[in-house]
Image: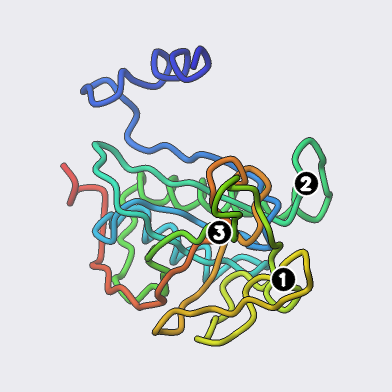
Amino acid sequence: MIRSQELNALLGPKGSAQAVDLLCDLHNTTANTGLCLITYSDCDWICLHICKHLQARTNTSSAGAIFNLTQTLFLLAMEIGPQPHSVVRSVIFSAMQEGVQLMMDWICQFNSGTLFEGGWVDVYTMVKNIDYPRDSETHVITAAVHPNLQDRDFCLLHPGDPMFLSFSGETLRYKGKEALYPFFINEGAYYEKGIALSLARKRRVEIPSVRSETLR
């Protein structure tokens, strides 16, 4: 809480005319997401252009995920994994470094008046979160992510596919009616939130051409 207040004083105040125009929040995840860019609206043309820029140029796989959230500035999160918390893996560090540099290159070009042509961006739109199976009385977790699903972030999950393996050895299958894309599978920080994985639909979003003058 204290750190968030310090950042708000430094970069904000949030929602004010003095606030920065764009924030990029850097995270590592224990899930096998690769380089994942998260924006909070499918109409945030700036962040989607940055996503398009990275998808075309990064040396590592990159995916764009969209969460619906009301906001007053351009907000982009850059998640990368798998990397355990409190650990630095050189390959993950290098991939994040590359992603940040490509983002900064895009911003510099945008601020200099470069026209970025419109086009299509592949994104994953959040549908719902899935909790771990739990005991009905104690709410204690009774199963782990199935080996066939573990580390398969952004790989299509079909109805009937294995999802969890109970501690007694029973395979629990995905009971959804449509195939969806799982991500943040078995994220360590989400156990306390009751989230085993998130599910998303993949779609293509058309974005318009942008140049800095168009936002003034």
Residue under the image location 47 percent in, 20 percent down: 4
| Mark nearer the N terminus (3 vs 1) | 3
Q: Nearer the viewer, mark 2 or mark 1?
A: 1
The CA distance from mark 3 to mark 1 is 27 Å
Hey, which quadrant is residue 176 in on the image? bottom left
Residue at horizontal 36 percent and vertical 78 percent from the top: 203
Residue 71, how many percent across, how many down?
Answer: 26, 40
Query: Where does the image place residue 12, in percent across and percent down from the top left?
Result: 34, 20
Q: How many marks?
A: 3
Question: Residue tagged by mark 3?
Answer: 36
Judge the density around disc 1: few (<14), some (14-19), many (≥20) Cα neighbours within 10 Å.
some
Q: Is residue 111 left or right of residue 6?
A: left
Determine whether the residue tagged by mark 1 lies in a helix, strand or loop. Answer: strand
Instruction: In this rendered view, identify the residue nearer to me: 170 or 66.
Output: 170
Question: Mark 2: which amino acid?
Answer: Pro
Neighbour class for label 2 at 10 Å: few (<14), some, many (≥20)?
Answer: some
Q: Residue 100 versus residue 82: which sits nearer the camera? A: 82
Image x and y of residue 15, in percent: 24, 26
Dot 1 amino acid type: Leu
* Mark 3, secondary structure of its residue: strand
Residue topped by disc 1: 165
Report the Cα–Cα distance between label 3 and label 2.
16 Å
- The residue that mark 2 highlights is 84
Please tell me which residue is depicted at 54% across the width and 70% down the height of the picture: 182
Sort mark 3 into few (<14), some (14-19) or many (20+) by Cα contacts within 10 Å.
many
Spatial CA distance of label 2 from label 1 is 22 Å
